[in-house]
């Protein structure tokens, strides 16, 4: 069934920002007494917010200072502003949606500023979303709460049951499930945790238009 609207996560689905963020985070955690493997980094922190990450890391023994969140944001934004790649094939997905006049939005746990920094590197990309860029932090209800995706669906004027969500994290897939929205999970590498949350996995963006009957 072709959806009436598509709701995208941002980091890891539209822009490939997560490896850059994890590089900084890995060094910070190790420097503050909590070395974390790549696999555990994704399991613990993928799809979350930076404030939430801060509290999780402290609970696991990291000695992060009180001002770490703001400091991390500054360093992260500086790094992302240098160059944040797009996920390969995402522009072709948007082209396919535009050809069918299907509206779309972003629902991200990242901040509004972060989306402006990453998406803004690509001329015309932000404009394609027609103002429908929504942050769970700004809303005060980040994923896995369903509110962000419900808000995005409402803003597009489409019932949740007629939308689909495109996610790459179990946290986001839980939000979609709680909102009653079908979820497709972008998983270029095996991601059983994402599948366990009910997402239908696909490995490349070129495969998404056929999945959506575009």
Image (cartoon, rainbow, N blue to C red):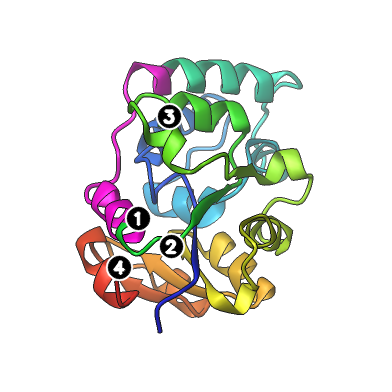
Q: Quadrant of residue 23?
A: top left
Q: Nearer the viewer, mark 2 or mark 3?
A: 2
From mark 1 to mark 4, how far is it between C-alphas? 30 Å
Q: Which residue has dot 4 on it?
A: 190
From mark 4 to mark 3, how far is it between C-alphas? 26 Å
Q: Residues within 10 Å of mark 1 (few under 14, many from 20)?
A: some
**Disc 3 on helix, strand or loop?**
helix
Q: Residue at x 56, y 77 (%)?
A: 162
Closer to us: 155 or 134 = 155
Q: Residue 47: percent from the left, percent from the top?
A: 54, 51
Q: Residue 96: percent from the left, percent from the top?
A: 28, 60
How many numbered tags mark residues here? 4
From mark 3 to mark 1, how far is it between C-alphas? 21 Å
Q: Residues within 10 Å of mark 2 (few under 14, many from 20)?
A: some
Mark 2 and mark 3 lie on one chain; the one further toward the N terminus is: 2
**Disc 2 on helix, strand or loop?**
loop
Mark 2 and mark 4 lie on one chain; the one further toward the N terminus is: 2
Q: Nearer the viewer, mark 2 or mark 4?
A: 2
**Residue 8 shows up from this direction:** no
Q: Which residue has dot 1 on it?
A: 98
Q: Which residue has dot 2 on it?
A: 102
Q: Nearer the viewer, mark 1 or mark 4?
A: 1
Q: Residue at x 47, y 48 (%)?
A: 41
- Reply above or below: 46 against 27: below
Q: Which residue has dot 3 on it?
A: 118
Residue stretch in magenta: 79-98
CB contact under 8 Å: marks 1 and 4: no
**Disc 4 on helix, strand or loop?**
loop
């Amino acid at each position: 069934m072709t959806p009436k609207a598509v709701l995208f996560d941002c980091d890891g689905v539209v822009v490939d920002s997560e490896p850059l963020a994890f590089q900084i985070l890995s060094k910070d955690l190790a420097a503050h007494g909590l070395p974390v493997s790549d696999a555990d980094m994704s399991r613990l922190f993928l799809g979350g917010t930076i404030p939430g990450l801060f509290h999780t890391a402290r609970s696991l023994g990291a000695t992060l200072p009180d001002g770490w969140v703001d400091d991390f944001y500054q360093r992260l934004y500086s790094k992302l502003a240098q160059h944040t790649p797009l996920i390969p094939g995402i522009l072709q997905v948007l082209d396919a949606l535009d050809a069918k006049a299907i509206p779309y939005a972003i629902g991200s746990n990242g901040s509004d500023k972060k989306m402006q920094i990453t998406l803004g590197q690509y001329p015309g990309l932000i404009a394609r979303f027609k103002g429908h860029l929504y942050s769970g932090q700004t809303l005060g209800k980040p994923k896995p709460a369903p509110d962000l995706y419900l808000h995005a669906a409402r803003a597009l004027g489409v019932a949740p049951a007629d939308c689909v969500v495109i996610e790459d994290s179990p946290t986001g897939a839980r939000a979609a499930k709680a909102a009653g929205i079908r979820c497709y999970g972008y998983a270029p590498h095996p991601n059983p945790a994402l599948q366990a949350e009910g997402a239908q996995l696909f490995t490349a963006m070129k495969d998404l238009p056929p999945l959506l009957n575009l």
